[in-house]
Amino acid sequence: MLEALREELHQLHLELPRHNLVAWTSGNISARDRETGCVLIKPSGVRYEALRPEHMVVVDLDGRLIEGHLKPSSDTASHLYIYRHRPDVGGIVHTHSTYATAFAAANRPIPCYLTAMADEFGGPIPVGGFALIGGETIGRVVLESIGSSPAILLKNHGVFTLGPTAEAAVKAAVMVEDVARTTWLALQIGRPDEIAPDDIAKLHHRYTHVYGQ
């Protein structure tokens, strides 16, 4: 079932190692099918180069297996918690990308020093508290701390991004690491100035309502 979404999700997973956002088998993407309400997610512990569309696991919003012969990601319960409480979300990405996760390890949000951050995220990237892997706890922390941002860092863990589609969530994950790397480099040089909130709002509005085709 959901052959087109399986193929799309497979292709999106290949973007994670391509952009150096994951190592070995870490990280995952899920996508919600709007017609059936089902969720597709990466199987647990499968290397990206071995991943195939038919490996994607289909579950319902309560975690019941609908289709698949492999175990779903260990983050599945948290993905489903987010989907149940955020009907606007159609895709979720989790990575341990290096520079963004360094901020997470230090329990520090990423300040909005860059117009690219204002464009994509509408402000700083927040950091949420520590949560153990395996249940819904990570999902709860994400929703408690993410606010209106499409991205959040989790203390001592990594990055979660949300989007109306899986592709949008992947784009946000790529941009998180890009701005985290630039921010880290800027902090080595000195003390960057944060962009004023009014200017952040103007930049974000232009990017989301005017920019592009």
Image (cartoon, rainbow, N blue to C red):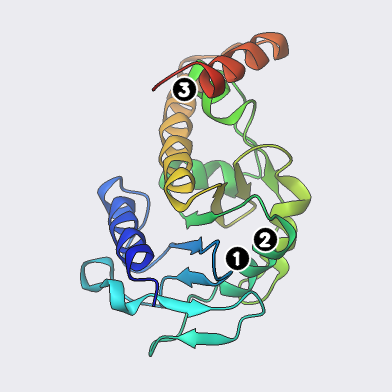
Alpha carbon of mark 1 to alpha carbon of mark 3: how far? 35 Å
Q: Which residue is mark 2?
A: 82
Against 45, is 124 above or below?
A: above
Q: Nearer the viewer, residue 93 or 163?
A: 163
Q: Which residue is mark 3?
A: 188
Q: Earlier in the sequence, mark 3 or mark 2?
A: 2
Q: Residue furthest left?
A: 49
Which x, y percent locates residue 123?
64, 26
Q: Residue furthest bottom?
A: 69
Please state which amino acid type lies under the numbered disc 1.
His
Which x, y percent locates residue 147?
74, 40
Against 63, is 167 above or below?
A: above
Please state which amino acid type lies under the numbered disc 2.
Ile
Alpha carbon of mark 3 to alpha carbon of mark 2: how far? 36 Å
> Which structural element holds mark 1?
helix
Q: Which residue is mark 1?
A: 79
Q: Residue furthest front?
A: 35
Q: Earlier in the sequence, mark 1 or mark 3?
A: 1
Q: Nearer the viewer, residue 154 or 12?
A: 12
Quarter of the image with the C terminus is top left
* Tag count: 3
> Which structural element holds mark 3?
helix
2 and 1 marks in contact (CB < 8 Å): yes
Would you call the spot at circle 2 few (<14 residues within 10 Å), some (14-19), or many (20 or more)? Answer: many
Residue plotted at (48% across, 75% down): 73
Q: Which mark is residue 136?
A: none
In the figure, is residue 138 to the left or right of 31?
Answer: right
Which x, y percent locates residue 63?
61, 81
